[in-house]
Amino acid sequence: MPALVQQTAQLLAFPGRGISLRGALTPALKHHRLPEQLIEAYVREASAFEGCGIDEALTRVLAARMQFASLDLSNAKRIFLIGPSGAGRSSVAAKIVQSAARAGHNQLVVIDSQGFNPRNLKARAAFGCMDGRRDSEVIGVVSAMADAEDVSETIAAFRLKRIIVTGLDMARRFGALAAAVTQGARLAHVSRAPEADAPLETLSPRELTELLLS
């Protein structure tokens, strides 16, 4: 590890008295282009752990905010994927079908919706009706490469209860990922590679901290 990078990592983990938690954490979060309101919330909540290193304080904040609900492919009947164009719905659909087949569940139906405009009120109403059906579940698919505020707006507009985040292998900044998984929607999985045989994975608060402080 280059000396400068190592020194920066050590500074984030163990800030000295002359460097406040806010002063160390805020630039890191801004680098990943989180919405200003979310940055302020993270910093305020992390301040309760002022005695910890920056990494531990942020991990605790994320652990309190993140909710998890992995797909149970053995019981699912029909999964309806919705997400903006380019979010990776088709790739996620293929992964789910392959995973279900490996688990011996060949009756699972995965429906890949067409891309939509989150501002389209008719689309919102239609997807809202789908989510109320007992024989199906709506799963939102959003990309880690998208704009963080756009991701937040999409999740809020469609009231997505559970999401899958794609594009972790291509993202250079992780504000969209953080925004997606810490504002109420339960995280089912993340996708680190687009290939159908690449698994859907989980993401821990510690792993997200490492991405945001890198």
Image: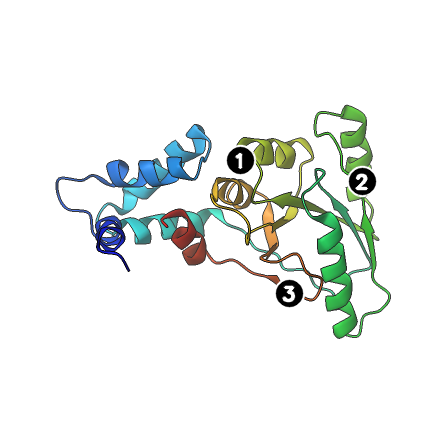
Q: Which residue was labeled with disc 2?
A: 114
Looking at the rendered structure, the secondary structure element under dot 2 is: loop
Residue at position x 55%, y 54% in the image: 169
Return the x and y of residue 49 as percentages of the image width and height.
28, 47
Q: Give the CA separation, mark 2 to mark 3.
A: 23 Å
Q: Is residue 64 left or right of residue 12?
A: right
Is residue 75 in view from this perspective? no
Q: Amino acid at mark 3?
A: Pro
Residue 95, by quadrant, is bottom right
First in sequence, mark 2 or 3: give its number.
Answer: 2
First in sequence, mark 3 or 1: give its number.
Answer: 1
Q: Which residue was labeled with disc 1?
A: 148
Residue at position x 54%, y 51% in the image: 67
Q: Which mark is residue 199?
A: 3
Q: Amino acid at mark 2?
A: Gln
Q: Nearer the viewer, residue 178 or 160?
A: 178
Q: Residues within 10 Å of mark 3 (few under 14, many from 20)?
A: some
